[in-house]
Amino acid sequence: MSDPRIDEALRSMLPRMRRFALWLTRDAHAADDLVQSAVERALSRWHTRRDEESLRGWLFAILYRLFLDGKRRAARQALLLGSISNDEPTWPSAERVALAHSTLAAFAALPVEQRSLLLWITVEGMSYREVADILKVPIGTVMSRLSRARRALRQLGEGDPESPSLRLLK
């Protein structure tokens, strides 16, 4: 594994992976641990990678799957321990900063699946096809999920959280 091309390819992806991990975990130390685990997993499974173009999607898929596995593990542990801490952040009172924080809070209130889609498409600039490959779903599913995520973020930002509509089935 001492190939300089592998080293350079991974180094170039570290800032993006860390930024995505920060949004997922909301904690710098946990994000660093998550990125380290993802890089370790990528190196140990480097031979399973399909081609050069899919490196970014492959690394993000590893990172996302590790995050989900960690969340599931934490949920099981929380059930066993019976205690979940819920620390609410406090925001500064300056109007501009408060507005920015409220927007970020609305983004943070989105489910992790919607946050991930918005980050991959809008921040990372990934194509719908790349995201569909990461999630292993059809491209139309990515597009509809992204539409719902944008609508949810818009409604949360306006202070109007949408309650799910129920359909009657006969």
Image (cartoon, rainbow, N blue to C red):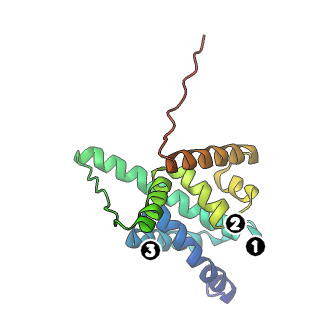
Q: Nearer the viewer, residue 154 or 63?
A: 154
Q: Please name the residue that numbered disc 3 is placed on.
A: 32
- Position of residue 152 relative to residue 14, above or below, is above
Secondary structure state at the residue bearing disc 2? loop
Which of the two marks, 3 or 2, is nearer to us in this view? 2
Q: Nearer the viewer, residue 113 or 101?
A: 101
Question: Residue 61's x, y, as percent?
Answer: 61, 60
- The mark nearer the N terminus, 3 or 2, is 3
Q: Please name the residue that numbered disc 2 is placed on.
A: 125
Question: Residue 95's x, y, as percent?
Answer: 41, 65
Secondary structure state at the residue bearing disc 3? helix
Q: Is residue 113 visible?
A: yes
Residue occupying image coordinates x 69% and y 67%: 49
- Position of residue 23 relative to residue 170, above or below, is below
Q: Answer with left or right where residue 131 lies relative to residue 35.
A: right
- The mark nearer the N terminus, 1 or 3, is 3
Residue occupying image coordinates x 60% and y 64%: 60
